[in-house]
Image (tube, rainbow, N blue to C red):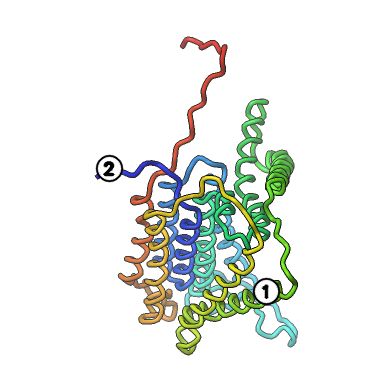
Amino acid sequence: MTPPLPRAVHPAAWWGWAVGLAVAASTTTNPLVLLLALAVAALVVAARRGSSPWARAFRLYLWLGLAIIVVRLVLHVLVGLKFGTVRVLPLPEATLPSWAAGIQLGGDVYLEGLLSAATLGLRLAVIIACIGAANALANPKRLLRSMPSALHEIGAAVVVSVSVAPQLAESVQRVRRARRLRGDTGRGLRAVRRIALPVLEDTLERSLLLAAAMDSRGYGRSGAAPARERRVTGAVTFVGLLASAVGLYGVLDASTPAVLGTPTLLVGLGLSALGLWLGGRHVVTSTYRPDPWRGAEWLTLGCGVVAAVALTVVSRTTPDALVLPLEPLAVPALPLLAVAGLLVAALPAFLTPEPPKPAPRVASRGAVGVAS
């Protein structure tokens, strides 16, 4: 079988895959399942990210997730609700007034409480890593080009904000390279102070240049529409988004009535699509060489959906398998359906086309080679 030619997968497919993986991670506090989801995201990013600046920003999201876990543990030690039987850190407890009932300042720290805080922080860290994976795999400029016409106003602002983290990673590398060329090899906090200001200044300047370039090309501009039609479009879109939110909550929460689950979600998605169509009729845009949507895109999107569906089914059938048993403390289970769904989410690392490699730099005319 001939391998597919290198090409960039549609950015919307990568975002759909990442959202599905994030939904799957949001349904569990089982550390084994969460670590598997994190490994899947890292594998796909390592195998299919390109050479663009935003492709190198995934590491920043991992550090952000680690910081969230540490902060969650510190807050639990300081003001968290202590519970458990295995005491690991004896601390004095401060007496608070009656209006602060329910808040425990200090007190003995137990292993069960620490594990609970760590798993909650790990879940949020994995969700952030999934969003970081989408940011590393999908070109935000190409994503804006593929968005519906009605979303160009919001899309322009979103692209500028999403591009801050990749530009930050590129600015850090550029400033560090300039420091090495000047012979500045300082490390520690002193080096951080000398790097932070140039990095922030360069990142802000490049983001503003991107916003100006997009504005000069017509992004963010909308056509004229009658006031009544704008009100109808806004009402339909708002009702659709509200119904989608209620339906998504009903799908994830098994205790809600069945009518508030999938039926409400489908109605909300339909109304949202109708609102986008109504709002985009007066926005005329053209696209040069639109990104194709082929089998690789359907495969990527389907793998994310399979992971989300598998974890949702497990949460409804055997919810105890997706939580860390704390009372009594025990080794968490590893549900086979959840593992299978996450392994399916890893298939884009092997079955999608490789990203195109950057063109080699051509020496300028008149350049003289140096013999080794």
* Type of amino acid at the residue the image marks with label 1: Gly
Q: Which residue is mark 2?
A: 2
Q: Which residue is mark 1?
A: 234
Q: Quadrant of the N terminus?
A: top left
Badge 1: residue crowd in 10 Å (few <14, some 14–19, many ≥20): some
Q: Quadrant of residue 92?
A: bottom right
User: For this rendering, which residue is in front, 288 or 144?
Assistant: 288
User: For this rendering, which residue is in front, 194 or 127?
Assistant: 127
* Mark 1–mark 2 CB contact (< 8 Å): no
| On screen, residue 178 above or below 308 | above
Marker disc for residue 339: none
Q: Residue at x 48, y 60 (%)?
A: 18
Q: Residue at x 48, y 31 (%)?
A: 359
| On screen, residue 202 above or below 257 | above
| On screen, residue 127 above or below 138 | below
Q: Earlier in the sequence, mark 1 or mark 2?
A: 2
